[in-house]
Image (spheres, rainbow, N blue to C red):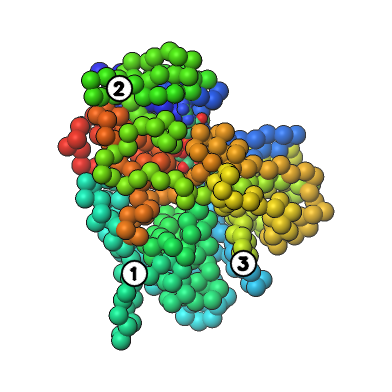
Amino acid sequence: MARIAVIGAGMGAMATAARLAVAGHQVTVYERSAGHGGSLGRHEREGFAFDTGPGLLHLPAVYRDLFVKTGKRPLEDCAELVQLDPALRHVLADGTELTLPGASRGGAAAVLDQTFGAGAGERWNGVLGRARDAWNATRRPLLEEPLRPDWQVLGRDPYPALRRSGLLRRRPPTLAEVAARELGGGLGELLTARVQAYGIDPATAPASAAVLPYMEQTFGSWYVRGGMRALATAVYERCLERKVAFVFGAPVREVLEREGRAAGLLLADGTEAAADFVVCGVDPRPLRVPLPSGGVPADGRQVASRYTLLLALRGARPADAVHRTLVHSPDTLLTVLRPDDPATRPDADHEAVTLSAVCGAAGTDEAPDPEALLALAARAVPGLRERLLWWEARTPADVEAATGALGGAVPPPALAGAGGRLLRPANTTALPGLFLAGGWAHPGGGLAHAGMTGALVAGLIVEGAGFKGSQ
Ligand SMILES: Cc1cc2nc3c(=O)[nH]c(=O)nc-3n(C[C@H](O)[C@H](O)[C@H](O)COP(=O)(O)OP(=O)(O)OC[C@H]3O[C@@H](n4cnc5c(N)ncnc54)[C@H](O)[C@@H]3O)c2cc1C
């Protein structure tokens, strides 16, 4: 039995902690704030309640697997997951509106034909079919295995781009180029928006970013009844059941090193916590941990943040309101979330709505103008102005306060292609005994991907360097 110190009580760190405890290790999580969950915050005021972090889960299988591997009660007994249907609504800049059904290729194609003309659905499914090929080609090395030492091979774009006769391919196309060439117009905008919502710029992203809309359409988008924080609480309670210890109000200042290996933590109050292994589940840059030698850099400078507005509205949520709407405009993509969940409002005569926009990390960009976001939101929520009781903003600085990530950066899922620029550092580091989990490590951020780091790091610690990946 080894003593394992985990830094941070975010989802990646807690997923790792639960798996390590099941393997018989003595695990202690050191969290600087007063509670668990990291990004999965909840703000309550006057009977309204809002998720301040992610509003949806993709790939629930990641957490189903965590619950199966760490105890008797499955995820569904510990948190109520609801699949969105319809999956989402788009309101395009030219006013076109369309609502796509949940996890249905045929249903989506029919709506696209109706909106953009016959053949649009086939073109869309053609792109997502190529995205499926990219997903299948990279799923294991990108998501289920530790980052391979020759990670450069993942820098090649697996998206099987259409070749045009007579044209020499100078370089693989970007996602924006695929959207323009293979879809065009409003249909192309649907593809770029779905990638942009992850904080990834379609103009520079590899075409393989199309795996993100593929993943959503194939595996669905899921809400957790009672708010997304309920998922964090379920994972936290699973950790407690497995006897993981939590020390809250315990900021970690440094990883201790003795005789060339990780030996524990130095806390901000000067106390030391000895350990045989250390798992860093936070942005590693402020802690100056030695990153994997020769691996991809943990360069967070280009990682975007989020600006969120929490809206309290008078009046009932209309029965036909859609849970997620993307409002497109030339300079902002706005996500509007309207959960049909009594736990989010004081009574049936009120509604809680969350708006979020991708923005630069704190200190790198002008913050979005809340009035402009409210004007955009009114395109998705009729009568918004008249119904508005109050709103509150959550800025990149608030995200930094919640997660400790520099500038409030929110790392997106890792992607193959683009020369490896969108990969994240390996879970193993240059310091033996020190491992990286959570959104800042392979295979990147987002609820599902950060959850996957748990299986990888636990595998590497339990099975050692010979660990070949999760099942
Ligand atoms: C506003 C916002 C919107 C998002 N939207 C989406 C979305 O739509 N879809 C999606 O899939 N994902 C989204 N994400 C990302 C997703 O929430 C995270 O990737 C996921 O929760 C995993 O987080 P993590 O494990 O990296 O830990 P984090 O959530 O980053 O938590 C890190 C924890 O470590 C603690 N900590 C930091 N430094 C120290 C230290 N030195 N000592 C001790 N403790 C420390 C922090 O207090 C925090 O509790 C969003 C995140 C934010 C903030």
Residue on which the image places disc 2: 257
**Residue under the image location 44 percent in, 19 percent down:** 267
Q: Position of residue 20 (x, y in %)?
A: 31, 27
Residue furthest to the bottom: 166
Kindly identify the amino acid type of the residue bearing the numbered disc 3.
Answer: Pro
Tell how many labels: 3
**Residue under the image location 66 percent in, 56 percent down:** 321
Position of 445 with respect to 430 (left or right) is: right
Q: Position of residue 34 (x, y in %)?
A: 55, 23
- Between the C-alphas of marks 1 and 3, the distance is 25 Å
Label 3 beta carbon less than 8 Å to ligand 1: no
User: Which marked residue is nearer to the observer: mark 2 or mark 1?
Assistant: 2
The mark that comes first in sequence, 2 or 1, is 1
Kindly identify the amino acid type of the residue bearing the numbered disc 2.
Answer: Glu
Q: Quadrant of residue 123?
A: bottom left
> Which labelled disc corresponds to residue 249?
none
Residue furthest to the top: 271
Residue on which the image places disc 1: 172
> Which labelled disc corresponds to residue 330?
3
**Residue under the image location 71 percent in, 46 percent down:** 311
Kindly identify the amino acid type of the residue bearing the numbered disc 1.
Answer: Pro
- Marks 3/2 in contact by CB < 8 Å: the verdict is no
Depth check: give the residue in front, 205 or 392. 205
Q: Residues within 10 Å of mark 2 (few under 14, many from 20)?
A: some
Q: Look at the image and tell me in which quarter the N terminus lies.
A: top left
Q: Position of residue 345 (x, y in %)?
A: 70, 40
The mark that comes first in sequence, 3 or 2, is 2
* Residue at disc 1, secondary structure: loop
The mark that comes first in sequence, 1 or 3, is 1
